[in-house]
Image (spheres, rainbow, N blue to C red):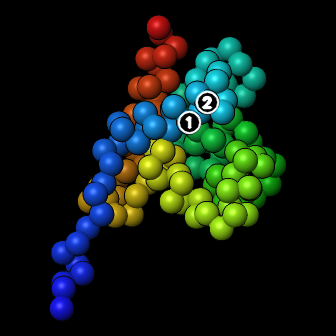
Amino acid sequence: MTDQTAVRPQLIPIPERVAAGAAFLDEHDPDWWRADVERAIDLETLNLESSNNCILGQRCPLEGHLPDRYMAYGSMLAGIRGNGFAVDAWARPLGFQADPDSDQWEGEYDLLTVEWSRVIRERRSA
């Protein structure tokens, strides 16, 4: 019998996850990082733990309660979810959500927020 507690999934580092998320947004929302677009991301309020202040929540806000943090990103995600795909499984490798398998789970949203802020600031200053 194998000890299942010793087997842990290979975790993707936060910078790689955020880079993958940025590439996803570049494809589906090309100006997502710009400061001069409608629904520009406010770096002062950016908080990946908040459904209203995360990357996707700021780019595509919904009024009222969000049944799922990522349904704010519109019908594309509704289609993914409707096909039985777990939104969490989609969001974690793209740096939109913390990974509960991480050793730093408690502070991972803070680390994600810092990395997303860094990427956006870097793009805005280029």
Badge 2 crowding class, 10 Å Cα cut-off, few under 14, some 14 to 19, many 20 or more, is few
Residue 35, how many percent across, how many down? 62, 17
**What amino acid is labelled 2 in the image?**
Glu
Query: What residue occupies the far top of the structure in this picture?
Result: 126
The image shows residue 67, relative to residue 34, as above or below, that is below
**Residue at the (43%, 17%) spot, across then down:** 122
The image shows residue 113, relative to residue 36, as above or below, that is below
> Of the numbered discs in the image, which one, if any, rests on residue 115?
none
**What amino acid is labelled 1 in the image?**
Phe
- Give the structural element (helix, strand or loop) at label 1: helix
Q: Is residue 36 left or right of residue 45?
A: right
C-alpha gap between disc 1 and disc 2: 5 Å
Residue 9, how many percent across, how many down? 30, 63
**Residue at the (61%, 30%) spot, across then down:** 27
Asked whether the beta carbons under mark 1 and mark 2 sit within 8 Å of each other, the answer is yes
Which quadrant of the view contains residue 73?
top right
Query: Which residue position holds label 1?
Result: 24
Q: Is residue 41 visible?
A: no
